[in-house]
Image: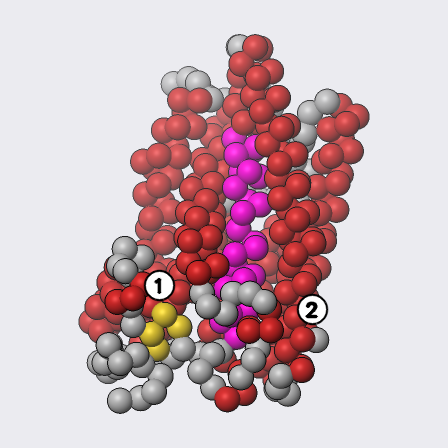
Amino acid sequence: MSAWFSAAEAPPAEASPAAALDEAALLLRSFTRDTATLGARAPLPKLDGFVFVLFIAAQLALNWALRLIIARPLANFLLATPKRPTRALRRMVVKFSQACLELLVYGSFAVIGAIIVPLQPWFWPSKHWWIDFDKGGHEVMRDDLRCYYLLYGARYVAGFVNVLLEPKRKDFVEMLLHHAVTVAVVGISYLYGWNRVGCVVMLLLDPADVPLHLAKMFKYVSDARESRDKKLAQRCTFCADRVFELFALVFLVTRIAMYPYVCWSAHVEATRYFPKGLPEWTCVALLWTLYGLQCYWFYLIIKVAVRMLATGRAEDVRSDDEDDDPKDQ
């Protein structure tokens, strides 16, 4: 038996769609099993590729199911959508549904990451991300961590599709680039054993999106109800502004302050323990690219904050150019 597999688990059968179904079921069950009973192995590109495709298809289906079963009905209820809504209100329902869906997805992954990643023996200090990398073994991942990794990459592929389908924002190109770079980081780090730093990146990127999308939902309710229930609209505006402030704080801490340490560690600290090749330098370049995007979005956050101080309410500067006034015909 290969040393890449735990003593408690035999290597998987030859890669095939049927084997991928069994492997996907095994990985998903790992979230509910005792960690002492979990297996661990290195990547098997063909088998894991099948599993990855299954996870992409499952998340696309789940996204649309959540949209139809939860997000859209909640949007119609909270926005008090009439039987014959205006064009602008229909678009607001779509945007509320998207924000609700993103809240559910990002929130779920933030919780999963917070449960799984900090419990790994190499989590801290950061030198353990790199020590003995050149001797092998870093590519071995426990089942729950491997499942989290593959699901995360699949989520961003599904997210890439959603960005293409949802109402276009002014940072449409940046969002596509962000999703493409994230998928590339996940793929390269998974195959070449940089999964430790990859998991830390995943852990840092998700939390800020939860209050962001919650703030959007409050804002859409406020805009939709402003002409019909001013008190409710004012309460929602207040909540949107406070949640936006929380989002800005979390974004600043996790993505602007903590994330560049990860980039530094991959760029500088890792070099103390092994020489880098093309895959490693590619990961470093992609990590810094992601940081550049975070800085761009933080610039947009500052613009929103300045506008909020001037007008008394937060407005999303990334919104599309069309008028979103729900009173429009």
Specify which label sits upstream in the sequence, 2 or 1: 1
Q: Residue at x 70, y 75 (%)?
A: 268
Residue 206, magenta (yes or no): yes
Say which mark, if any, is on residue 144.
1
Q: Which colour style is shown? A: secondary structure
Residue 167, magenta (yes or no): no
For mark 1, give the secondary structure.
helix
Q: Residue at x 22, y 73 (%)?
A: 19
Disc 1 residue crowd, few under 14, some 14–19, many 20+, Cα 10 Å: many
Which corner quadrant of the image does residue 53 belong to?
bottom left
Q: Residue at x 64, y 73 (%)?
A: 266
Which corner quadrant of the image does residue 284 belong to?
bottom right
For mark 2, give the secondary structure.
helix
Disc 2 residue crowd, few under 14, some 14–19, many 20+, Cα 10 Å: some
Q: Which residues are magenta?
A: 194-217
Expressed as whole percent of the image width and height from the top left, the position of residue 250 reads: 62, 44
Residue hosting label 2:
264
Expressed as whole percent of the image width and height from the top left, the position of residue 123 reads: 51, 65
State whether the magenta stretch is mostly helix, strand or loop.
helix
Q: Residue at x 62, y 51 (%)?
A: 254
Q: Can you say which quadrant of the picture contains the N terminus? A: bottom left
- Of residues 123 and 290, the one nearer the viewer is 123
In this rendering, position of residue 294 left or right of residue 77: right
In this picture, is 12 found above or below 68?
A: below
In this rendering, position of residue 111 left or right of residue 264: left
Say which mark, if any, is on residue 129.
none
Expressed as whole percent of the image width and height from the top left, the position of residue 58 reads: 32, 56
Residue 185 in view, yes or no: no
- Of residues 308 and 321, the one nearer the viewer is 308
In this picture, is 93 found above or below 12?
A: above
Which corner quadrant of the image does residue 293 belong to?
bottom right
In this rendering, position of residue 60 left or right of residue 163: left
